Amino acid sequence: QMHLVESGGGLVQAGETLTLSCAASGIIFRLNAMGWYRQAPGKQRELVASITSTDSTNYADFVKGRFAISRDSAENTVYLHMNRLKPEDTAVYYCYLHGWWSGFLRTAWGQGTMVTVSS
């Protein structure tokens, strides 16, 4: 069974920096990608950033140039480095892992971590 545990959320002021971490526990046969979505109150969940097993990255336009995603393949951990945070970045951030384990192609989700950016 796959579990994702996120950490690093909190309350910061606009312009500050925050780094989220997400550690996956379990045996992965083949990793396709890990990444982060976010969901603000009253809005749909949206992709923030992703990174593949070959370290190819993808970013939503609204975070390009401010956020950076990275991973530690040995620890199955993904990070989201968030710089120059804005109040509109306030949301619950969810990490995900997409890959093969237990014989199936699956997606696992973390429980979410709250990021609040005050103006």
Image (cartoon, rainbow, N blue to C red):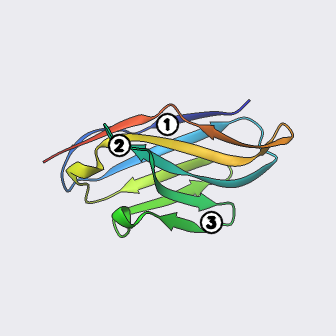
- Report whether 96 appears left or right of 26: left
Pinpoint residue 38: horizontal percent, then vertical percent: 42, 45
Q: Callout 1, which amino acid?
A: Glu
Say which element carries label 1.
strand
Q: Nearer the viewer, mark 2 or mark 1?
A: 2
Pinpoint residue 31: horizontal percent, then vertical percent: 73, 52
Mark closer to the chain start, 2 or 1: 1
Of the 4 image quadrants, the one containing the N terminus is top right
Q: Nearer the viewer, mark 2 or mark 3?
A: 2
Say which element carries label 2.
loop
Instruction: Please give the residue where the numbered disc 2 appears in the rendered image.
Output: 43
Reply above or below: 32 against 27.
below
Can the viewer see residue 75 in this picture? no
Reply above or below: 36 against 109.
below
* Residue placed furthest toward the right: 103
How crowded is the residue under tag 2: few (<14 C-alpha within 10 Å), some, or many (20+)? Answer: few
For the residue pair 27 and 57, the one nearer the viewer reads as 57
Mark closer to the chain start, 2 or 3: 2
Instruction: Please give the residue where the numbered disc 3 appears in the rendered image.
Output: 55
Q: Residue at x 65, y 55 (%)?
A: 33
Q: CA distance from mark 2 to mark 3?
A: 29 Å
